[in-house]
Amino acid sequence: MTMNVDYGTHDALLVVDMQNDFCEGGALAVAGGAALVPGINAEIAAARAAGALVVASRDWHPIDHVSFAHRGGPWPVHCVQDTEGAAFHPDLALDADTLRVSKATAFDTDAYSAFDGTGLGGYLREQGIERVIVCGLALDVCVKATVLAACEEGFQTLLLETLSAAVDPGAVTECHQAFEDAGAEVRP
Ligand code: VGL
Ligand code: ZN
């Protein structure tokens, strides 16, 4: 089953941070993370079949990243470059044509949005992309920041909320307000 998005060649499906550390058993596990994989794979297949671009972002921190607790940051050590925890979920159906975007790679800055410091916005515009369809983890952190940034970058933005999950489910109401204020469409 797919979300019935009418994908076309001016669309990019942006799969946010579907990495082992954000799934059950990972260092910063999001409840329900791994269960999203089959649905996201169906979207990837539908997007690909319609000639849409598929992009997968990943949180990709150096050892001793500023966001880690032992450096005074808010998070446990997670998504350290080249570790198993930072790898994409093994069942995620990425292929050779999927664009991989690594973010938050500098020691001294964190980046939640897939557009932050990656050049992704300019690249998508160059490719003629007009709409960005977002899913993945975590709804209240990197998905939220990515949706808001996509709106700010001038893309029509659609969030597939059933293909996302929050670190803090208590933060979801506030996320909805932010999405609405930014002009993003949320498909429940
Ligand atoms: C994320 C916490 C810390 C995310 C990344 O991808 O949502 N959350 N770093
Ligand atoms: Zn991180």
Image: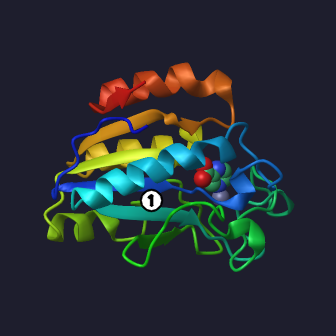
Q: Residue at x 32, y 26 (%)?
A: 181
Q: Residue at x 30, y 35 (%)?
A: 4
Q: Residue at x 46, y 54 (%)?
A: 15
- The amino acid sitting under disc 1 is Ala
Q: Is residue 146 visible?
A: no
- Quick one: SS at disc 1? loop
Crowdedness of circle 1 by 10 Å Cα count: few (<14), some, many (20+)? many
Which coloring applies here? rainbow
* Quarter of image, ligand 2: bottom right
Residue 104 in the image: above or below residue 6? below
Q: Is residue 185 left or right of residue 116?
A: left
Where residue 69 sits in the image (x, y, percent)?
82, 56
- The answer to which quarter of the image holds residue 49 is bottom left
Q: Is residue 132 visible?
A: yes
Where residue 33 sits in the image (x, y, percent)?
66, 44
Residue 69 in the image: above or below residue 123? above
Q: 21 or 173, which is in the foreground?
A: 21
Where residue 77 sits in the image (x, y, percent)?
80, 62
- Reading the image, the residue beneath label 1 is 114
Q: Is residue 186 left or right of residue 53?
A: right
- The answer to which quarter of the image holds residue 107 is bottom right
Quadrant of the rendering where the N terminus is positioned: top left
Where residue 3 sits in the image (x, y, percent)?
37, 35
Quadrant of the rendering where the C terminus is positioned: top left
Q: Is residue 22 left or right of residue 146?
A: right
Q: Residue at x 69, y 37 (%)?
A: 32
Q: 172 or 134, which is in the foreground?
A: 134
- The answer to which quarter of the image holds residue 138 is top right
